[in-house]
Image: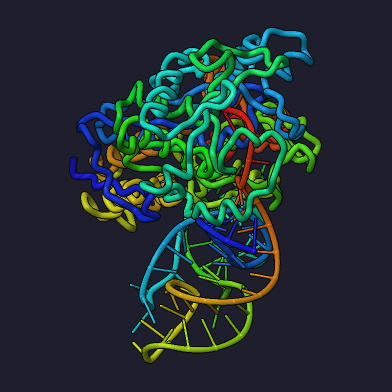
RNA sequence: GGUUUCGUGGCCGAGUGGCUAGGCAGCGGUCUGCAAAACCGUGUACAGCGGUUCGACUCCGCUCGAAACCUCCA
């Protein structure tokens, strides 16, 4: 593999050469959704970010096992701050089995991720299905002396761990500072140190979701499932662990500690984190009234949206920014993305119809082979190899579109080889790696093609007789049906909106 | 307050110690019956203040501003 992929490791804050532990295999674990609510914008970014990572690793020829968990146990309702289990709380309100809620929202998640053209991971394990693994991990940590039991609950002994290991190495935190900055809250009496975290929690009477364990009937601590499931499916030491930057501390920090304590060494080689999104420069929050679900985006039903935005528009918009940058959503920006994506897709449609024009006399023949087209290809790979820089890839695809349109206008010519390479660049990067797709294509297309061919041939006759009234009428009516007719030198063409 | 990201032209966003992505919008032009599309041309932007340097938007410090996390729970 001549491609040298460099990825930004949060652990070292540097770009490092990606060298899989057991080539050609590559293991990828990403923190998935907590299924207690409809999927929203916050779910889209990590899903798409790591979908591209997954797709690119596959493209490079790695045998990738991609694991993304479904968290279906024990969560708080975020805004209530009252210590209740998120899923259990929802269940009480809606009078449903907790697992019914989890199932419903997991299904919703899959539906919307499919719409965003996010590939299904290799394995999507559920926390509720891995109680034994989690309990075993708690036992190992207890045996290793890095945990203690109090009243049926088990806590990780961060203070002890920090003597020999560095708790905070991932997030840049120092334990002493954490202590100073920690407020005293109720319900912490069981813990020896404020930074200690639960490995196993004894269920209070109101907790509906509970499982038996050696310590109590209860539920696992919230960092545990990822440690247990990632190592179960990817091994004690695997390549990439990803997630949102909001999970850096304490979630991922604690995962490192748990694995170190249970296994004796760390389990992750490269940590990748995607940055957060904002909406009109603000964070997204239910209390701010800008909490927008993906369903609302796709249908345009949220008050702050001027229109509906298609799944591919969202995907393209997200990919136009680098995954480690914050990304701001606004109507203006989304509309720009919508137009840009359309330009790309129209460009590709034009490309497919192009024939090589090498032998035709042309005012400005393109340099061949290692010329412009080869440069674009190289630039696309260089961009992906530089920590998955999708914006640069997209910029290069736009350069490709410019060339395509010039070719279509007969302003430039291209060799058959370069034309093939250009097509290959688009199928590889636009569709396979960036995972974008042409939303216009559907089953009705052949029918539409035939009808439009008929309509345009009739219109052409009216144009030849300079019957502009009929010609314009056809075009205007079609426009109302969202079909745009374009008259060019070579005749008329059309496109469906 | 601490930790971690950031602050780029009208908007969104790449990037680099000196050669200045890309998209959208705007302006001028070509083409066109008109329109649309396309193509060509056009914008000395890099939060502020210091410092390092022959030279910084890019390195360092401070200030201002934004976001995530810093708590029980995933």
Q: Where is residue A217 drawn, in percent x and y?
A: 58, 13
Nearest the eye: A210 or B64: A210
Nearest the eye: A457 or A200: A200
Say above or below: A152 vs A310.
above
Say above or below: A221 vs A428.
above
What residue lies at 68% left-to-right and 48% top-to-bottom? A183
Q: Where is residue A233 drawn, in percent x and y?
A: 35, 21
Q: Where is residue A288 drawn, in percent x and y?
A: 78, 43
Q: With A344 as the anchor, is A259 left or right in this view?
A: left
Nearest the eye: A377 or A137: A137
What residue lies at 53% left-to-right and 55% top-to-bottom? A176
Q: Where is residue A447 drawn, in percent x and y?
A: 55, 15
**Residue A491 visible to the viewer:** yes
Say above or below: A285 vs B44.
above
Q: How is the image coloured?
A: rainbow
Choose top left, top right, bottom left or bottom right for residue A25: top left
Say above or below: A226 vs A444.
below
What residue lies at 28% left-to-right and 46% top-to-bottom? A5
Assign the N terminus of chain A to one quadrant of the image: top left
Choose top left, top right, bottom left or bottom right for residue A50: top left
Nearest the eye: A402 or A263: A263
Count the marks: 0
Q: With A103 as the anchor, is A257 left or right in this view?
A: left
Assign the C terminus of chain A to one quadrant of the image: top right
**Residue A451 visible to the viewer:** no
What residue lies at 37% left-to-right and 34% top-to-bottom? A261
């Amino acid at each position: 593999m001549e491609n040298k992929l460099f990825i930004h490791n949060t652990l070292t804050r540097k770009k490092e050469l990606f060298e899989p532990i057991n080539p050609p295999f590559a293991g990828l674990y990403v923190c998935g959704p907590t299924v207690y609510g409809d999927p929203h914008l916050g779910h889209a970014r990590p899903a798409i970010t790591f979908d591209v990572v997954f797709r690119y690793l596959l493209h490079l020829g790695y045998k990738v096992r991609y694991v993304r968990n479904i968290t279906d146990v024990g969560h708080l309702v975020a805004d209530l701050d009252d210590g209740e289990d998120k899923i259990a709380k929802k269940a009480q309100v809606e009078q449903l089995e907790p697992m019914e809620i989890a199932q419903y929202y997991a299904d919703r998640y899959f539906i919307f991720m499919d719409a965003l053209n996010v590939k299904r991971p290799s394995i999507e394990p559920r926390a509720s299905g891995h109680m034994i693994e989690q309990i075993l991990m708690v036992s190992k940590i207890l045996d290793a002396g890095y945990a203690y039991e109090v009243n049926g609950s088990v806590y990780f002994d961060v203070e002890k761990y920090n003597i020999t290991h560095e708790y905070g190495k991932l997030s840049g935190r120092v334990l002493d500072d954490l202590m100073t900055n920690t407020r005293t809250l109720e319900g912490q009496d069981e813990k020896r140190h404020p930074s200690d975290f639960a490995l196993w929690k004894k269920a209070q009477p109101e907790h509906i979701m509970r499982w038996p364990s050696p310590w109590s009937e209860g539920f696992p601590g919230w960092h545990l499932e990822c440690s247990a499931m990632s190592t179960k499916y990817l091994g004690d030491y695997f390549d990439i662990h990803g997630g949102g930057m909001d999970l850096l501390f304490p979630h991922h920090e604690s995962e490192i500690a748990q694995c170190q304590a249970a296994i004796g060494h760390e389990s992750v080689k490269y940590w990748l984190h995607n940055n957060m999104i904002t909406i009109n420069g603000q964070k997204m929050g239910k209390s701010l009234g800008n909490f927008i679900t993906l369903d609302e985006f796709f249908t345009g039903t949220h008050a702050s949206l001027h229109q509906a935005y298609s799944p591919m528009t969202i995907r393209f918009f997200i990919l136009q920014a680098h995954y480690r940058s914050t990304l701001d959503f606004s109507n203006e920006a989304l509309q720009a993305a919508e137009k840009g994506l359309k330009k790309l897709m129209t460009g590709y449609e034009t490309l497919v119809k192009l024939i090589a024009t090498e032998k035709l006399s042309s005012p400005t023949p393109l340099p061949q082979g290692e010329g412009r087209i080869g440069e674009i290809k190289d630039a696309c790979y260089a961009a992906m190899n530089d920590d998955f820089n999708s914006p640069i890839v997209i910029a290069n695809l736009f350069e490709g579109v410019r060339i395509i349109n010039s070719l279509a206008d007969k302003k430039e010519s291209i060799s058959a080889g370069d034309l093939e390479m250009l097509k290959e660049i688009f199928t590889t990067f636009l569709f396979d790696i960036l995972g974008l797709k042409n939303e216009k294509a559907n089953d009705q297309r052949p029918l539409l093609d035939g009808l439009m061919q008929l309509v345009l041939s009739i219109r052409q006759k009216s144009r030849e007789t300079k019957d502009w009234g009929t010609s314009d009428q056809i075009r205007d009516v079609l426009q109302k049906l969202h079909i745009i007719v374009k008259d060019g030198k070579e005749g008329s063409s059309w496109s469906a909106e």
